[in-house]
Image: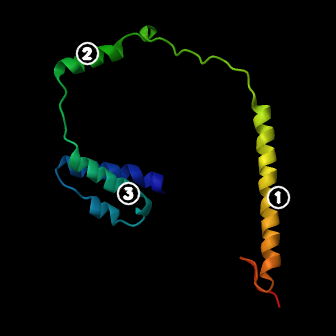
Amino acid sequence: MLSSLLPDLLATQDAAWREGRDITAELVARPGVGDLAPLLWLGQALWRVLVPVTPRPDFVAALRQALRAPTAAVRPPTPMPSRPRRRAPWLAVAAVGSARSLTGLVWLRRQRGRNSGHLPMAGRPARG
């Protein structure tokens, strides 16, 4: 629902800004907007700070010409040099580390269970 609500909210907010009005508080107060409120407030902050700028005509002409230029002039990306994969040692180290951590957690839980005696473990109901 939020994804279908977002374009309408942003279009409404933009239309109001173009008229010189700020209706962010009204939009945030609408039902179902909850998670989108920070996005609307961010938009409001940017609207207050940013100043519209009209680009120079020569810049627009140069940009338009560059965008219309044939794509053959664009150099393809250089592939990354291939390196041999050396995952096996890291996987072994990660497996040993995980096993040690799990063993330590089990040992710690047993120690706490022995030391507490009459106190129940967290998350379990008291016995007896």
Task: State the residue in front, 51 or 28.
Answer: 51
Label 1: which secondary element: helix
Q: Where does the image place residue 6, in percent across and percent down from the top left?
A: 40, 52
Horizontal relation, residue 109 to residue 70: left or right: right
Q: Residue at (63%, 16%) from the top-left corner?
A: 81
Horizontal relation, residue 10 to residue 89: left or right: left
Horizontal relation, residue 2 to residue 120: left or right: left
Residue topped by disc 1: 103
Q: Name, please, the residue furthest toward the bottom.
A: 128
The mark nearer the N terminus, 1 or 3, is 3
For the residue carrying disc 1, how many other residues have a C-alpha within 10 Å: few (<14), some (14-19), or many (20+)? Answer: few
The mark nearer the N terminus, 2 or 1, is 2
Q: Amino acid at mark 3?
A: Pro
Q: Amino acid at mark 2?
A: Ala
Residue topped by disc 2: 62
Horizontal relation, residue 31 to residue 85: left or right: left
Q: Amino acid at mark 1?
A: Thr
Q: Which mark is residue 38?
A: 3
